[in-house]
């Protein structure tokens, strides 16, 4: 199956963002709905992606070989399944830098937002921070604790995780 330039670029996004959801690809691809993303995946990239047990979108090994992109996550074979390296957008890299460590009290989206504002002099939307935290959770580097509101902390030690910023 020969892929168009657009399909190859979008496959690279799947490789980079995995594990991901329709909504994340919808934002990246500037599509109108998750259904449109699903249809594109099925029609154009059907041989190169699959959904895992949690219905998250992942690229096949063949897909990763086809595109010249670092995978979104890499795991140390000696670790307990936790990633040792992630490639994420800049906001998510900043979240990792300010988020509570595994042995600290988990914090709310608003708390993380305030830390980002203080540390980086940026003003991201609270929904973007929430989305970033959830994406990092899917990658296995953030855990959620449900109190009055969902709260978050790193699931791995900051020193054990290499974070690269994707384009």
Image: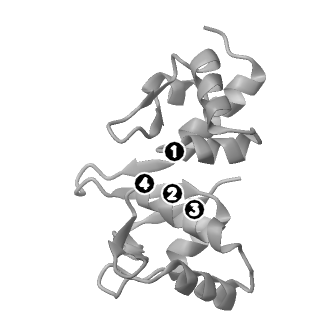
CA separation in Å, label 1 and label 2: 7 Å
Check disc 3: other Cα within 10 Å, few if <14, some if 14-19, many if 20+.
some
Task: From the top left corner, tell me how far across and down residue 43 is, in percent.
Answer: 62, 16
Task: From the top left corner, tell me how far across and down residue 127 is, in percent.
Answer: 63, 68
Q: In this view, does 32 lie above or below 141?
A: above
Q: In this view, does 59 lie above or below 3?
A: below
Task: From the top left corner, tell me how far across and down residue 131 is, in percent.
Answer: 57, 62
> Which residue corresponds to mark 2?
135
Which mark is on residue 97? none
> Which residue corresponds to mark 3?
131
Q: Which of marks 4 and 1 is nearer the N terminus?
A: 1
Q: What element carries label 1?
A: loop
Which mark is on residue 20? 1
Pointer 4 with pointer 2, Cβ within 8 A = yes
Q: Give the position of the N terminus as an image quadrant.
A: top right
Pointer 3 with pointer 2, Cβ within 8 A = yes
Query: Where is residue 114, by image quadrant?
Result: bottom right
Q: In this view, does 59 lie to the left or right of 160?
A: right
Q: Which of 83 and 155 is in front in this view?
A: 155
Task: From the top left corner, tell me how far across and down residue 73 is, in percent.
Answer: 45, 49
Q: Outermost residue toward the front?
A: 148
Pointer 1 with pointer 2, Cβ within 8 A = yes
Pointer 3 with pointer 4, Cβ within 8 A = no
Pointer 3 with pointer 1, Cβ within 8 A = no
Q: Which residue is drawn at 53% across and 25% down?
A: 63
Which mark is on residue 138? 4
Q: Is mark 4 on a helix, strand or loop?
A: helix
Query: Where is residue 68, by image quadrant?
Result: top right
Pointer 4 with pointer 1, Cβ within 8 A = yes
Q: What element carries label 3?
A: helix
């Amino acid at each position: 199956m020969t892929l168009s330039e657009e399909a190859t670029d979008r496959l690279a996004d799947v490789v980079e963002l995995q594990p991901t959801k329709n909504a994340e690809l919808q934002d990246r691809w500037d599509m109108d709905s998750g259904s449109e993303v699903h249809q594109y995946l099925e029609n154009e990239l059907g041989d190169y992606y699959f959904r895992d047990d949690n219905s998250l979108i992942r690229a096949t090994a063949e897909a990763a070989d086809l595109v010249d992109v670092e995978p979104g996550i890499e795991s140390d074979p000696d670790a307990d399944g936790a990633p040792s390296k992630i490639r994420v957008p800049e906001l998510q890299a900043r979240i990792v830098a300010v988020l509570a460590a595994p042995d600290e009290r988990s914090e709310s989206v608003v708390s993380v937002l305030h830390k980002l504002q203080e540390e980086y002099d940026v003003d991201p939307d609270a929904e973007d921070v929430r989305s970033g935290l959830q994406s990092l959770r899917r990658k296995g580097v953030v855990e959620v604790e449900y109190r009055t509101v969902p709260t978050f902390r790193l699931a791995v030690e900051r020193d054990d995780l290499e974070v690269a910023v994707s384009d």
